[in-house]
Image (tube, rainbow, N blue to C red):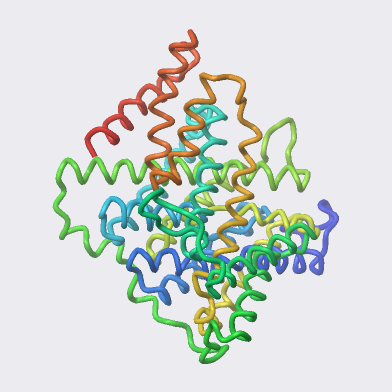
Amino acid sequence: MKNYFEFEKHNTSYKKETLAGFTTFLAMAYILAVNPLILGDAGMDANAVFVATAIAAAIGSLVMGVWGKYPIALAPGMGLNAFFAYTVVLGMGIDWQIALFGVFLSGIIFLIITLFKIREVIINAIPAEMKYAAGAGIGLFIAFIGMQNAEIIVPDPATLVSLGDFRNPYTFLAVFGVIVTACLMVLNVKGGVFFGMVITAVAGMLFGLISPPSGIISSIPSLAPTFGAAFTHLGEVQWTTEMILQLSIVVLTFLFIDFFDTAGTLYAVANQAGFIKDNKLPNAGRALLSDASATSVGAILGTSTTTAYVESSAGVAAGGRTGFTAIVTAGFFLVSLFFSPLLEVVTSHVTAAALIIVGVLMASSLRLIEWDRIEIAIPAFLVVVGMPLAYSIASGIALGFMFYPITMILAGKGKEVHPIMYFLFFVFAGYLFFL
């Protein structure tokens, strides 16, 4: 094992790698509670989603560790799960089973474009500013969902939305959670988001707002409600032109977000670990293939897109330098399968802080956009605000990507726009005007 992962070359040890793997797990363990809650809103069985989340994270992290040899863990991605539940299922009215099929297709396409080395062409086609805008917009969308679920933001007939009543004990609990989590993050506590949820849940139980769990350890819940559901309903669907176009947009959006989120995460974590050489990522193909295969497997199990987690940087900071770190993280995800009763105390008011803080982290990419270039600022801004205001990640991307070629042409820079962006202009224009 030491020789396979080249411990001596990376100046690491079993102790360092194990500690790093545990640190990474703590940093991303919140997804075990948040993902079932979000996909549960789409009508999926929360217990089955919990199992699918843990197993998908374990398999994805294991493949990344053994084959990709990177200290990067995977799990169902934040933002992608929100797009799945609130845009695709609740917004477009697509059954969650068909949405899972869309996730599966996006994973297969990801595999193909990676195998045939088409990824460079796609990366170069979409301008960096639009990628940054998409990441920030998803962050705002996730934070808005968190505030809405916690009743920090509530509907208002006059202004559409307004601030909630902080005298409501449940809303106050959510605000308390945000404050605690923010303090932990500022103090650089590893796993701050996870521990913030734990403290909030405990506070909720102490003040009688949350009922204690019926137990701590139990047998693993059944995966039957979601396993293979991506394929069982295909024969019942009426494949109209509108349905095919909708599913195409869904697959394209899943692919777009996962592709660039993964590429950005891999580069950021690898750079922190000192793996980047001459601005290139060694074994990038293997790492991307690990991510793509995990997405397809996750869809079969019954969860939204599985992707590389930037929280892996916590493990790297703790000394993780090889794929053994990811293997350890995978092991902890498997162990977590026996603690499903604890999900009973993880209410929407408990998870609100996690959604809001993750939103903050994702919105940090706003600083990378050249706001003084109006031809870039307009489409980027439309992407960012379009997602939370239209309550749809796809709609935000569509608005920005439709305006980008227009503003660039008017600025006399039409030749700088890649042909793929012109193609996407017509795709998203059709989506906005006809769907």
Residue depicted at x 53% and y 23%: 376
Residue 241 picture quarter? top left
Number of residue marks: 0
The answer, for residue 4, to whether it is visible in the render is yes
Q: Quadrant of the N terminus?
A: bottom right
- Would you say 103 lies left or right of 341 here? left
- Would you say 299 lies left or right of 20 here? left
Residue at the extreme front: 158
Residue depicted at x 47% and y 72%: 50
Q: Quadrant of the C terminus?
A: top left
Q: Nearer the viewer, residue 368 or 253?
A: 368
Residue depicted at x 55% and y 59%: 355
Q: Nearer the viewer, residue 230 or 208?
A: 208
Q: Position of residue 256 (x, y in %)?
A: 45, 40
Q: Nearer the viewer, residue 420 or 211?
A: 211
Residue depicted at x 33% and y 32%: 428
Relative to residue 2, is residue 404 depicted above or below? above
Residue 401 picture quarter? top left
